[in-house]
Amino acid sequence: MKARPLTLPGAFEVIPDRHRDKRGVFLEWFRADWLREATGHTLNVAQVNLSVSTLGAIRGLHLTRTPPGQAKYVSCMSGAIVDVLVDLRLGSPTFGQHESVRLDATEQHSVYVPEGFGHGFCALTEGATVSYLCSTSYAPEIEYVLNPLDPELGITWPVADPIPSDIAAQGRGLRDCLDEQLLPTYDECRALAQAHPGRLT
């Protein structure tokens, strides 16, 4: 496995070693010890989610209040998506910036999303199936939905007519999150990593 650092500090694309023979393909999809060594973060899995989305559907953007925050390990099990991460850590050198990564069932890459990030994705195929390993369980009182079409975020979604949920379409913008003081600091999020063994990035 390899971890490719994204342009947003602390986020990684995970590229597995795929072993192919006449029976098909085998790969290690997730290893906690390897992820800790490669990223400096420990992902203790508290909940696993699975979604199936129609072409053009947007899921997210979601943010969990930090602390405790929520880290995610995101993989596309069928079809293809564009996964989007938004750095919402106040004081981060890339605050307010986003990065997109294509995930599909062919290459079988994954994305590690650390605490303090907004996260969402857009389905590029019908029936795109996505798995998310989450470090904390869903807690609606500390979960926020950001409008994925907020012009201040400046995300260009890869379909002509993106389909957000009704809740997301009426979600908070980046300015709302700042005004309501919902965003964590860069130092708070790094402290979560420093509490665990491993190499900090």
Image: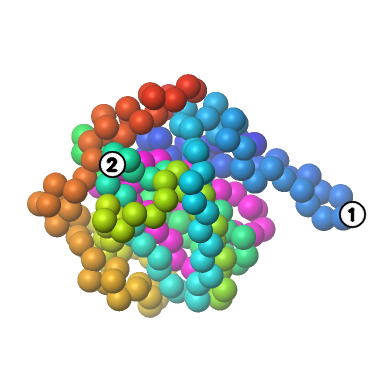
Residue 103 seen: no
Q: Does dot 2 land on a helix, a strand or a loop? A: loop
Q: Give the image quarter of residue 24.
A: bottom right
Graded by Cα atoms within 10 Å as few (under 14), some (14 to 19) or many (20 or more), the crowding at tag 2 reads: some
Q: Amino acid at mark 2?
A: Thr
In the rendered view, does 117 fall on the left or right side of 177?
right
Q: Does dot 1 land on a helix, a strand or a loop? A: loop
Q: Nearer the viewer, mark 1 or mark 2?
A: 2
Q: Residue 114, position in %: x, y?
A: 40, 41
**Looking at the image, how many numbered discs can be counted on the residues?**
2
Q: Residue 42, position in %: x, y?
A: 48, 32
Dominant SS in magenta: strand
Q: Report the residue that reaches farthest toward the right.
A: 22
Q: Report the residue that reaches farthest toward the left.
A: 179
Q: Residue 178, position in %: x, y?
A: 14, 49
Task: Based on the picture, tell me whether residue 13 belongs to the magenta stretch.
Answer: no
Q: Give the image quarter of residue 2.
A: top right
- Name the residue at 33% across, 43% down: 69
Q: Residue 95, position in %: x, y?
A: 25, 42
Residue 1 seen: yes
Q: Amino acid at mark 1?
A: Lys
Task: Based on the picture, tell me whether residue 121 belongs to the magenta stretch.
Answer: yes
Write down the residue under mark 1: 22
Write down the residue under mark 2: 66
- Name the residue at 55% across, 57% down: 131
Looking at the picture, does residue 144 appear above or below residue 14? below
In the rendered view, does 174 fall on the left or right side of 105?
left
Sequence-first tag of 1 and 2: 1
Graded by Cα atoms within 10 Å as few (under 14), some (14 to 19) or many (20 or more), the crowding at tag 1 reads: few
- Name the residue at 46% across, 31% down: 41
Segment colored magenta:
96-123
